[in-house]
Image: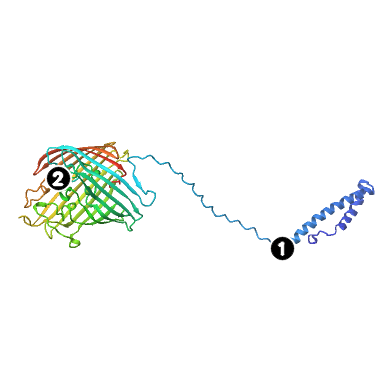
Amino acid sequence: MERLGISRRPWALLAAVALATAPSASRAQGTPVEQLQKELESMRKQMQQMQKRLDAQDAVIRKLGKEPAAAPPPVAEAPPPAPPAPPPPAVAKAPEPWSPTAPIKVLSGSRSYLSLSFDGLVDAGWSTTPDVTALETGDHDPLQRGFTIPNAEIVLNGAVDPYFTGVANVVFKLDENNETSVELEEMYLQTSSLPWNLQAKGGQYLTEFGRINQQHPHAWDFVDQPLVIGRMFGPEGLRNPGTRLSWLLPLPFYSELLGSVQNSNGETAYSFRNTEDDLFGRTPIDRNVRGPGDLLYAPRWVSSFDLTDSQTVVAGLSGAFGPNASGPSNYTQIYGGDLYWKWKPSWQSGGFPFVAFQTEALGRRYEAGASNGLPAEVLYDWGLYGQAIYGFTQRWVAGMRADWVSGDNGAFKADENRDDRFRASPNLTFYPTEFSKLRLQYNYDHGQLLGDDSSVWVQAEFLLGEHAAHKF
């Protein structure tokens, strides 16, 4: 306080003020001595209050001079974000009523599950020839005048674990004598997590050759299989136990390479080591597997391109190579090319309208051995089909297919397996839902040995449960 020029003795200051002001106040106001004393007392009290305030300020200054400056209060850090609140417990849904179109799932709450479905086909119709099997070359085609049950199929498929899926197709069918036969059409294990875009499959499966051979009968667009498929692969189609490896090429469009190695024996390898049929007049021989060269090899390449937003093309090349049963060292080679085009506009509703065209051309080189007085020779056969289907309105599809097969002249002339044939097949299909269909088809057949024949067939299909999606 003394540094600020303020005296720490208030009484001296008070006396000086009083002496300076008392004579002038007395002269100005003419007050008595008592009045002056009151004024002095009032000034003394004011000075005391001023002294108290000065002492308090002096105490604060001394405290600030002795204590170090306090650090600024720390800046409070933002608290870490609170963890998200746990989701509310799921409310159990009431079970939905069962429907015949709903999939039947077993252990659906675990990583493994099983989908079960059943598909049935019924054919009925008439042909100008009583020997319908002379016209129809497929084992799932109409077999006789009247009614045929060509295919009743139980399908099981699902995830085995995070690494494999499994598929099984068990087929029942009735022959001309109404006797039931059962076949394990497909049963295979397929990988789901291989690196480098690879996939492996092993078991009994339809060989991935072209388009029709891979399809089950209920996926066909016509009642029967094309003539060229029956000519090259026989009634059962090409299928056998084996293994297949595929590689999805790293391209901006779909392109895949596939290679199969399968057994080459039996009716399901018709043009190969098949001892059940006398092909081309030769008596088959038992030919055991002596090494890898006696197995069946089937490579395939397939690719898909979008021409426009509404048009897609799928093209493929296939081969099948293996020994045949006409001699101890005879082999068969089959080559094929396939093309599929589909138009479906962006303004379509429920999948309609659409137009699809499909064609396959196949050729076979068969090394026939000397047998039954016939010389050893190389036989060539070829054929193709082309089909177009038009979904012109909701649930209605019209189709047209043309078939042609031929072969060169061999030593065995009267061979219905190698004669020239032509067939034209218009049809109309109605789909009440995706789980049923009704189809009407007419076949006009012209054969080099059989002559001209006409057939009319009606087909009905129903599906119970969930079925795997068909390949595009």
Foreground: 179 or 141?
179
Q: Secondary structure at mark 2?
A: strand
Task: Residue 394: name its quadrant.
Answer: top left
Q: Earlier in the sequence, mark 1 or mark 2?
A: 1
Give the residue type that dot 1 points to. Answer: Glu
The relative height of residue 24 versus residue 146 in the rendered view (above or below) is: below
Task: Residue 297: name its quadrant.
Answer: bottom left
- Horizontally, residue 204 falls left or right of residue 324, namely right
Does the residue at mark 1 contact the one at mark 2 (Cβ under 8 Å)? no
Colouring mode (rainbow / by chain / secondary structure / one colour): rainbow
In this view of the protein, can residue 441 be seen by the observer? no
The relative height of residue 93 versus residue 166 in the rendered view (above or below) is: above
Foreground: 346 or 113?
113
Q: Secondary structure at mark 1?
A: loop
For label 2, the residue is: 404
Q: Residue at x 7, y 48 (%)?
A: 414
Sort mark 2 into few (<14), some (14-19) or many (20+) by Cα contacts within 10 Å: many
- List x then y, in percent, for residue 241: 23, 55
In this view of the protein, can residue 33 be seen by the observer? yes
For label 1, the residue is: 67
Sort mark 1 into few (<14), some (14-19) or many (20+) by Cα contacts within 10 Å: few
Give the residue type that dot 2 points to. Answer: Trp
Foreground: 256 or 410?
410
Closest to the camera, between mark 1 and mark 2, is 2
Q: Residue at x 77, y 59 (%)?
A: 59
- List x then y, in percent, for residue 149: 21, 41
Task: Residue 373: name its quadrant.
Answer: bottom left
Image label count: 2
- List x then y, in percent, for residue 179: 19, 44
